[in-house]
Image: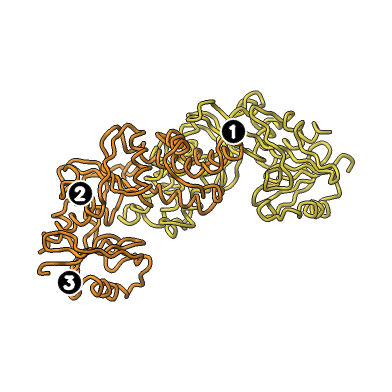
Chain colours: A orange, B yellow
Amino acid sequence: MTGAYLAIDWGTTNRRAYLMDADGSVLGTSRDDRGVLAMRPGEYPAELAAIRTRLGDLPAIAAGMVGSTRGWREAPYRPAPTDLADLAAAALRIEEQRFAIVPGVSLLAGSDPATMRADVMRGEEVQVLGAVAAGLAPADALFCQPGTHNKWVRVERGRIVDFATAMTGELFALLRGHGILAGMLDGPVADGEAFRLGLARGRGATDLPVALFEVRAAVLLGTLPPPDAAAFASGILIGADVGTQVEGQAVHLLATGTLADLYAAAIADAGGTATPLDSHAAFAAGIHQIWTLTR
Amino acid sequence: MTGAYLAIDWGTTNRRAYLMDADGSVLGTSRDDRGVLAMRPGEYPAELAAIRTRLGDLPAIAAGMVGSTRGWREAPYRPAPTDLADLAAAALRIEEQRFAIVPGVSLLAGSDPATMRADVMRGEEVQVLGAVAAGLAPADALFCQPGTHNKWVRVERGRIVDFATAMTGELFALLRGHGILAGMLDGPVADGEAFRLGLARGRGATDLPVALFEVRAAVLLGTLPPPDAAAFASGILIGADVGTQVEGQAVHLLATGTLADLYAAAIADAGGTATPLDSHAAFAAGIHQIWTLTR
């Protein structure tokens, strides 16, 4: 396996390790829940050694929260606009471990404090730029990466030029787990009539905290069947999220499963078109480009 | 004390009992945290007896969550538009306890399922209509009742005609207690530069879940001092809330303390004018009208 290496998407709650061939093809993967939140400060070298025991004693490169202040060592953000070459040049090397960490990306848009937008990402940049590098998406594209913190990323000529993080998934989880809506949101969330009604309520809404209380009121008043409450609430949140970002354009959706279905429906509802992409293939393509550029 | 009675504002987490003279003046009050969430189903008669031991063995009337399905007994909602006479006529009597419960108010606005708004209140209606009855506010007015679930109530000719509940306070509490912003929002929340920047970011925003993540990003990137994060986040949430409801008009603010200051600042920021009202005096006036009408 001359030239083979390990690539790790090391996030907050999960990590996925790829055994990469020298040509960028994926020879094997390993996924577990040893994300950054599960780590104690000194554990990283032993964790990397464990991955090497599983996949091979090879040099390694990682992206994601492992490079945050809560991770192994901080790999300072690269400010947008940025591309794979910039990220590769700024990769943090931990030589004694034959290990490198890809930096995240930061955004500071605008100069007026009242309208300035700040944002950060760690890990998503590799998927997005990898999708472009692999030809899965064009070099000018809008990406959506649904999850706890949904990222909307705008790429122009292969560079990340703008992005926004929406706490859509986190808000749903907080409302389901705590507070006045807890106990009402345990039903299934799938694309259907209740979800679509939620999309219509959430799209363009400036009163999201009012719309969310309406879930409770509609159940109490009998206009919303209790099993539909979760789908309606999810529709409100996803409708608000998508409605702000999508105005009829094509969206490249780095997601699978139910979340991909929900966002595809919301994007279509907002007049856009959603193209699902394989986020693992995108990560592998992106990290391989960075790896090659750091050699 | 001929004609004296007890009036109880019996809410979710707290209750306040008033010893009322026959003419509506308040002779004494008692406040504790024995709200509905602290009650087991069979405890209400003994709880009422305890209040009578403290304030006098008198007939009693209550409003608030005590009349909900989680409370003592359900006093079904009266649909808006409604007024004090309507609420009095629909009061639920529990004769063996010399006790009455004021119904809440429900709203179903619109007929198109995609745009229909559902809302409910219990207890706030007595304050709002009481403020009008006592001459603290005109018979055509917009009221704001900040709290965990902030109520915006529109009164026309002394009747509640429309209202909206915003989960503003609850969202702040959820974000402070759980999730990615937890640990960042423990600083003070007061009217100041950070709060004002939050107001500007939140007002009219269709991307509230993005604005909230910006709190974290701005702290990480050093553009927001960590002690300012709570005030900035509060400003975003209150700015979004107020910005949706206020378009330059007068707002009658049933609140005291910091929350009244924050909402007054937000209302002024949205071009409105805030008139603070004494919510206890408003409740006493409203419940006395209802009490008199039920005699």
Which residue is nearer to you in this view: A228 or A41? A228
- Residue under pointer 2: A131
Rendered residue at 84%/43% (across/down) = B98
Rendered residue at 77%/54% (across/down) = B47
Residue type at numbered disc 2 = Ala
Q: Which chain carries label 2?
A: A
Q: Which chain carries label 1?
A: B
Quarter of the figure that contains the C terminus of chain A: bottom left
Element under disc 1:
strand
- Residue under pointer 1: B153
- Residue under pointer 3: A58
Tell if the residue under mark 2 belongs to the same chain as the one under mark 1. no
Residue B197 drawn at (x, y percent)? 39, 44
What crowding class fits label 2: few (fewer than 14 Cα within 10 Å), some (14-19), or many (20 or more)? many
Q: In this view, does A17 lie above or below B100?
A: below
User: In this orientation, does residue B26 appear?
Assistant: yes
